[in-house]
Image (cartoon, rainbow, N blue to C red):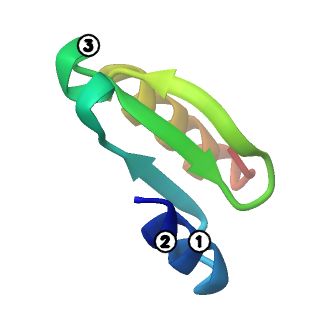
Amino acid sequence: MGKQIRNAELEKIPVVAVVGKREVETQTLSIRTRQQGDIGTMNTTELKESLDNAIALKANI
């Protein structure tokens, strides 16, 4: 999985949701951004709200 995260960073993908064994068990997503790096885990509702706010403000997550 580390290689996939690195490839996403090299391709300059702004937001990456990582889903591993732990995330499946807790039904969350581990979120990484280009500017802030690893920002922790969120459930899908929290992620949607965060992305909606960032889009509305035209800001970075």
Q: Is residue 13 left or right of residue 49?
A: right
Where's residue 46, x and y in %?
42, 21
Label 3: state its secondary structure.
helix
CA gap between label 1 and label 3 equals 24 Å
Dot 1 corresponds to which residue?
A: 6
Q: Amino acid at mark 2?
A: Lys
**Quadrant assignment for the C terminus:** top right
Dot 2 corresponds to which residue?
A: 3
**Quadrant assignment for the N terminus:** bottom left
Residue toward you, 31 or 50:
31
Query: Seen from this angle, which residue lies furthest right?
Result: 35
Q: Is residue 43 left or right of residue 38?
A: left
Q: Is residue 6 left or right of residue 59?
A: left
Query: Considering only vertical position in the picture, is 30 above or below 4?
Result: above
Q: Amino acid at mark 1?
A: Arg
Where's residue 47, x and y in %?
43, 32
Where's residue 27, x and y in %?
22, 19
Instruction: Decide: few, some or many residues near mark 2? Use Cα within 10 Å; few <14, some 14-19, many ≥20.
Output: few
Return the mark for residue 26: 3
CA gap between label 3 and label 2 equals 23 Å
Q: Residue at x 57, y 51 (%)?
A: 55
Instruction: Decide: few, some or many residues near mark 1? Use Cα within 10 Å; few <14, some 14-19, many ≥20.
Output: few
Whether pointer 1 and pointer 2 mark residues with C-beta atoms closer than 8 Å, the reply is yes
Mark 3 or 2 closer to N-term?
Answer: 2
Label 2: state its secondary structure.
helix
Query: Considering only vertical position in the picture, is 55 above or below 43?
Result: below
Return the mark for residue 43: none
Whether pointer 3 and pointer 2 mark residues with C-beta atoms closer than 8 Å, the reply is no
